[in-house]
Image: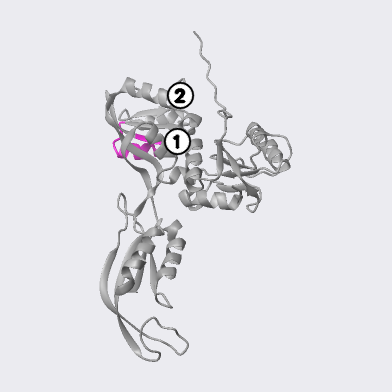
Amino acid sequence: MKLTIGEVLNKLAEFAPLSLQETYDNTGLIIGDPETLVESALIALDVTEEVVDEALRKTCKLIIAHHPVIFGGIKKLTPTGEVERTVIKAIKNGIAVAAWHTNLDNITGGVNTRIAEKLMLNNTAILAPRTGLLKKLVTFCPATHAELVRIALFDAGAGHIGSYDQCSYNTEGVGTFRAGEWAKPFAGTIGELHRESEIRIETIVPEFKLKAVINALLSNHPYEEVAYDVYPIENSFQAGAGIMGYLNEPMPVDEFLKHLKQVFGTPALRHTAIHKKMIHKVAVCGGSGAFLIKNALSQQADAFVTADIKYHDYFESGNKMLLVDAGHFETEQFTKELIHDVILKKIPTFAPLISEVNTNPVHYFFTQ
């Protein structure tokens, strides 16, 4: 089935909205025309010349990667570096390139959720939840249509609080209005004050779903003019950096490290000195997650698994937590299957193909 690139990426954005990316990021369509028709996409962790060659072989006109091929600014498009050569090759061959990066890291069900599933962690929660992502929507509806409006709001994405959905608060009251000369009132008579038994409906809406929820409200509300209020709230939302969870049973440290090596397929792990005998509560962050060390400590994690830990970062664990660097590529490798699964679920007739190119730039050398 052929779709425009924009249609494919919009479906992906329904799962991980661009608004959840960090300010420094470059998520979204980076190279190409969103109106171009495609019937398949190559899913990669990184975009390199070899990945572009693979897309050509597989006749994929779209590459969706986790890491943006253009992360900082490019001042010249000359074949002097890997990034420039990759961008030139993609443009020459009409291959579009998109990235779904920190927005996919920050969403519940995203990169870190997939890692937690691979590590068999239970009872998971966001390690550093973000605030300012929630709005409160208040509307006023005739009592006869309140249930219809509530369901429409819920179906559009409102009313989710933690593990609960369809959450709302409802208050009975009386609304008044007088229809003008050119009005087409649902109730009442033009020119006369009307009183209507109404329900005040209050519910929570993630900011990135607010437009869809308001459209649902306007489409299902019986009034010609719909009254509603939107309030900013500071409650944390289940989106943010890292994730915390529990192993099924406490695990000896050496067994836990073996578990990590097996899951991530890495030949080596870097970690702090071992002071805990058992590991139960585990924090994880795919890729560069050292900025979350204090968060993991404050939540009393037994271990924090991430990547790109610098020398002085290891001291921050304070002998209170096992700090493990399992590798950037290794901790994010499951992102390809995550993007693949999301697209296939959203667009069953589309063909997402997982790249077979190993783009890990880090290699290991061992001596006997």
Q: Which residue is mark 2?
A: 265
- Could you tell me which secondary element the residue under label 2 belongs to? loop
Does the stretch in magenta take in 310?
no
The reply to whether residue 276 is visible in this rendering is no
Q: Can you give x and y, in whole percent of width and height, for residue 228 in the image? A: 39, 71
Q: How is the image coloured?
A: one colour
Q: Residues within 10 Å of mark 2 (few under 14, many from 20)?
A: few
Q: Which residue is mark 1?
A: 286
Q: Which residue is located at x 28 percent, y 25 percent?
A: 251
Q: Can you give x and y, in whole percent of width and height, for residue 72 in the image? A: 60, 43
In the rendered image of this protein, does residue 119 appear above or below residue 1?
above
Q: Decide which of 205, 130 is in the foreground and name it.
A: 205
Q: Decide which of 210, 25 is in the foreground and name it.
A: 210
Residue range in magenta is 283-302
Q: Which residue is located at x 50 percent, y 43 percent?
A: 344
Residue furthest bottom in the image: 191
